[in-house]
Image (cartoon, rainbow, N blue to C red):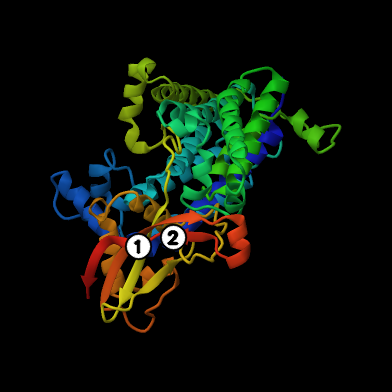
Amino acid sequence: MPSFTWGARFFMAGLGLSFFFAFLSIAFEAEMLIGPKGILPLDDFMNRLSRNRGGSTFTPGFDAFWAHVKTWPTLTWFSSDLSFVYGLTITGLLLSILLALGFMPGLMCLSLWCLYLSLTIAGQRFFYFQWDNFILEIALLSACILPFFKWRTTHQHLARLPIFFFGFLLFKVILSSAMAKWNSGDNSWHNLTALTFHYETQPLPTPFAFIFHQGPLVFHQLGCFITFVIQMGAPFLLFAPRRLRHLGAVLILVHQVLIALTGNYNFFNLLTISLCFTQLDDDFYRWVFRRTSPSNPQSPVQHNPLKWIGWSLAIAITLMSFGRMCQVVAPNMAPKTLVGWADDLRRYRSINTYGLFARMTKIRPEITLQGSDDGQTWKDYVFHHKPGPVDRMPSFVAPLQPRVDWQMWFAALGNHQRNPWLTRMMRRILAHEPAMFEMFEHNPFEEAPPKYLRAMIQNYTFTSWSKYQQTGNIWQKETPRVYHPVIER
């Protein structure tokens, strides 16, 4: 039997770090997003949930928790105060460090799952991202597999069955991503031209995205082809003999590194790479680190009732996960029973479908907020990370997630009527709420708020390499048009 001690260590470290950056991102933006003077105040949200269930105004406590937790499983039924949210966040930061160190990993994963699920529900539409669901799915599966009450996992030996569970989850995520692209009907994926748009139009590009975008057509087509080969082929290697399994895991890992270099996808790439670590046995790591023998003796696999209960739950989760995968890979063949079970548990966001960029965005509209005191001269509010000034190079922000910057990208693909949160944010800016200005690199109205505020939209494109050398501009933009009409203080 191969041993997976090193893989388990690296996986727990990667999952712990992913949770750490996820909670840290929340800590930076909680007041702005769901604070009393934030964009979507948590107290208002909890009141709506309470009234929707036929109740009265939200009264925090055990009664509210037991009355609503089955429908909306969040600890914020105990309190919607911002201090309570910060308490959950700080607790999550501490537990994520303990998980990264291998301290009682099963219990840490279950606790982190509970905390993060609570915050994703409290965060409303700002937490509707696939990686928020992905980290919850990994945490719940890990809670069933990893040692629950073991104080330190230095010598922990994981058997092949738990490694299979992690391998299947990795298989589902990667293969679903490929099949979502292939089944979308988007010709840019079929003719291998999707990457001619992707580096430029993705939500938060990096400096490498600008460099990669300058490549010739054949370079982008080759990149698309390699993406399909890896995402459609490597997942199946995870169930092959040892050397092929290693090859599949390494191919996925390298591909994730390349994705992380060209786009800010927060902690998603780190999570996927962490799953890859579980598929590489100790002999592989000894070969990489030039070790001829294990650094520590391996403890035998302990067969106890708690472990078998956890593995049974993991089997149930994996079966429902298989049903979810079939919805993307082969929609007409999806097992209705498994899909139905997964749908019943949808509120827990832990058995999901995946498929980023199934349809490639061909243009990049960008929203710019502008303020004015006289209605004639307008000044821009510059965000930290989304494209703004044409001469500003894209930056690295992952594994942190600037959620407002991401939502501005989605809002630009629609209209302001479908994004009422943007109107609320603009009114908070006009009210000169201090929490709002955390999202901006520069506030052009520091002393007092403007009298008027509007949102303009215009298409951005990368400049050519020669034009960049001549002008220093990364972006070029078209004539702006009104996205949100003027509102007045």
Q: Quadrant of residue 421?
A: bottom left
Q: Is residue 480 above or below residue 198?
A: below
Picture layout, residue 35 above or below residue 451: above
Residue 471 seen in this snapshot: yes
Q: Identify which residue, 155 or 210, lies in the foreground.
A: 210
Residue 104 image point, x, y percent: 58, 41
Would you say the residues marked 2 and 1 are in contact, meaning their CB atoms lie under 8 Å apart? yes
Task: Kindly identify the amino acid type of the residue bearing the numbered disc 2.
Answer: Lys
Q: In this rendered view, identify the residue nearer to me: 359 or 462.
A: 462
Q: Tell which of 413 and 336 is nearer to you.
A: 413
| Lateral position of residue 230 relative to residue 59, left or right | right
Location of residue 126 with respect to 280 vertically, above or below: below
Dot 1 corresponds to which residue?
480
- For disc 2, the neighbor class at 10 Å (few under 14, some 14 to 19, many from 20) is some
The quarter in which the N terminus is drawn is top right
Q: Residue at x 36, y 84 (%)?
A: 447
Whether residue 37 can be seen here: no
Label 1 sits on a secondary structure element that is loop
Q: Residue at 25% across / 50% down in the picture?
A: 418
Q: Residue 477 — which label?
A: 2
- Residue 357 is situated, as x and y percent measured from the top left of the image, at 45, 38
Q: Residues within 10 Å of mark 1 (few under 14, many from 20)?
A: some
Please tell me which residue lies in front, 130 or 122.
Answer: 130
Residue 343, image x, y percentages: 32, 28
Residue 24 screen position, x and y as percent: 50, 57
Which amino acid is tagged 1?
Pro
